[in-house]
Amino acid sequence: MSEQAWWSNQDFWRKCAIFVTAFMFVVLILLTFHSLAAISSGTDRVPAYSVINHRIDYRFDEARNMKVPVIGEEAPLFGKVLSEDEARELVDLGKLTVQAKNCMNCHTLLGNGAYYAPDLTKAWLDPGWGNEQARELLMTMFLKDPKTNARTYGTNRRMPDLDITDEEVRGIIAFLKWMSAVDTNGFPQGFEPLPQGGS
Amino acid sequence: MPAEAAMDVGAAVAEDTAVALNTRSLTAGQRLALKYFTVAMVLFVAQMLFGLLAGIQFLYPEFLYGVLDFNVNRMVHINAMIVWMLYGFIGSVYWLVEDEAGVELVGAKLANINFWVLTSAVAVVVVVYLVVQVGPGKQSTIWLINEGREYIEAPRWADIGIVVCMGVFFYTIAGTFMKGRWSGISGTLVLDLIALAGLYLAGMFYTTNLSVDQYWWWWVVHLWVEATWEVLVGCIMAWGLMKTLGARREIVTTWLYIEVALMFGAGILGLGHHYFWIGTPEYWLGIGGFFSALEPIPLVAMVVHAVYDAGRHGFQSSNHPALAWLIAHAFGNFLGAGVWGFIHTLPQINLYTHGTQWTASHGHLAFFGAYATIVIALIYIALQRWRGDVWMSADLPDRGWKWKWSLILLNVGMMGMTIALLIAGYEQSFIERAIGGSTWAAFFEGQTQPWFVQGMQWRMIFGVVMTAGLVLLLWDLLTIGRGETRPAKEVHDPAGPSGAIESGALSRAPV
Amino acid sequence: MLDPVELQRIAIAALSAGAIVLFGAFYAVCLALGRLKTLAFLLRISYLAYAALVVATVLFAWAMNLAGWWLVLVVVLLVGYFVAPRAIWRLSVATHESSEPKPPTGAGGNE
């Protein structure tokens, strides 16, 4: 095996495998540090939890060639302005409930999950709620009693009753509102939010 | 001495087994492997069953509504898959460890207890999924019932249990190699197991921030199925090729390294294709798109090596069913991971296809092609030995109709489902995303279009075809080689084939 | 900057992408078989397959709106699909030859 070309021998490829793996992994680690800083709450891309005190819009950004969330004037959820800590607590309850009720195995969140039910990324802004005034009430009624309040658009697919408490409902809605303000690089494409603030 | 204890266990297993299987000729590790393979097949059945239920619900939403809802069926469907494949891999590693290390399994008794602990935990988790299903929005639900994160739903107590069991598994494997001898294959295998277990930890915490949650979640999911699982399969295959096709160690080891270099070269940063839309910075569109677009190239290039080997040495196989499944692996992996992955991997198109039935289509074929096929092949290899190294080449007593038909039905069923889902997915991305602007109304409009509905009907039909294939497969696994007296065909060609099939183990994006 | 696929080109984008991988594999198989059995016509077909791959790649670049930085990817795909199978062939010959008595017919190919 001594006459074997350097580029075909085992030792060369072992070193290659180790080097490539290590290099790519180090690059991934560096990118991870940067990305995690960029997506911690309170950044441009992922808003602070108190964003739920504000109106959230979704508008086209010429420079980026995609739609981006725009945080507008004060429009507190359930009519009550929350501190950052209170907002975090409420969104946290929502996130925890979304996990505990296994929402992700019917719906998608940021496009990840199952494909039996609609994506929830922009659920807060969905034109299906009709108007800004009715939205919170309709969402609450739906989550409290999805069997009766289901709108299945002819598919007959209804969300099951998941025994969601009043507090959990508020949490879920806060979480959905917060999620709609995450900058998702234009996903989902072409989404038109419901009319808000007379817009 | 653990070997004696293992012999007792072996004797017990032999008594339990009605058919005349030559369990005594197996090593402790191999007997343990058979247990893992058995559970793997039971879970394969569970995967199929709950897949059928979920598929029916797409067509008849009232079916089991409020009893076993879609989210429960779907969760059991995908969890059973992950776990049966892991069981297949663990079984395979136990199958080869003593042969590769040249000594008896270290901690055989402990390994055996570990099997029962792990299997009991899996059973409890599944029962809780089915009976309790969901809980209140509290940490206790995450700890005891269900974590609600796709693929890694297992509650936290089970996560910790899994890590402990993996630790024991790792100890027995690494310990055996340390006591015996190391090789290129075993070294790669052990390092890969460390990475595999380490990555799981990235999925074991709770955070309010969904973007951060999904960032780490993809570390587990992507770096398992598109990196560490691939390498694990590569190691198992390298050993399998030496044993069943008489390939030479030096060559398979070199090709294992080549594979690792190419696979990790594109696959690690290929992770970026999951970071397009979860809140992560825009540079991931470029990095993810670029590296995941490169992932099929090595897969295609490796075809050359497969042709080279096959052409030069022919496939002299002592085990036709195993070889046929390895070929199914090469094709399934190429189509599922390569073609189906590449068609929607760039962000320019993924913007429409992300989170639609395209993903389901790709996921089905890629998981089946890359992993299900290989585990089935390994089970055939193990069965042959278990039956006492009997003949499993051409001219089987019943012409081998069972293995042939199960292979055909499973593969045709999978291809049919994949194509049906792709058509449904195309319809969905067009109607819901491109035209409808991704609203709820648009989602449901897409779901009621004739093409979509027919796609779901065909998926169901092909799902039933697959189920028939699975029934036949299990029947064959239980009966093949029974009553066979001819010894296995000799295939030890000094210039035997080398890495032909493991080339196919290279792949990209099953998720 | 991300320029998403036009509505009416989604199918073309996906089909051309699939064609790239399939022609890539077809090229690789023809190349390997042609060299293995020293069949000149298969080698010629392999070039045809590669030509088809180039066409598919151009279509892909057009349908996917690849411009600017993304054109690097197009070049890498074209070079990669051409070179990688050849490199793997040489590697196959080199790794197998080194410890085998008889080199295969057509080993080394006709580069």
Image: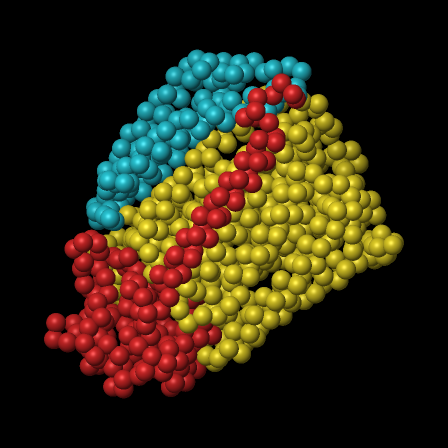
Chain colours: A red, B yellow, C cyan
Q: Is residue B141 left or right of residue A196?
A: right
In this view of the protein, which residue sits in the foreground, B136 or A185?
A185
In this view of the protein, which residue sits in the foreground, B474 or B22?
B22
Q: Is residue B106 visible?
A: yes
Which residue is rendered at x = 72% and y = 41% of the image? B182
Which residue is rendered at x = 40% and y = 61% of the image? A36
Q: Quadrant of the N terminus of chain B?
A: bottom right
Residue B62 locus on image (x, y percent): 41, 70
Within the image, what quadrant is residue C18 found in?
top left
Residue B198's place in the image compared with B411, above or below, is below
Within the image, what quadrant is residue C59 found in?
top left
Q: Is residue A103 left or right of residue B17?
A: left
- Single out the residue that lies furthest toward the left: A198
Q: Is residue B376 visible?
A: no
Residue B179 locus on image (x, y percent): 78, 47
Residue A2's place in the image compared with B355, above or below, is above
Residue A180's place in the image compared with B316, above or below, is below
Residue B48's place in the image compared with A81, above or below, is above
Q: Is residue A116 left or right of residue B74?
A: left
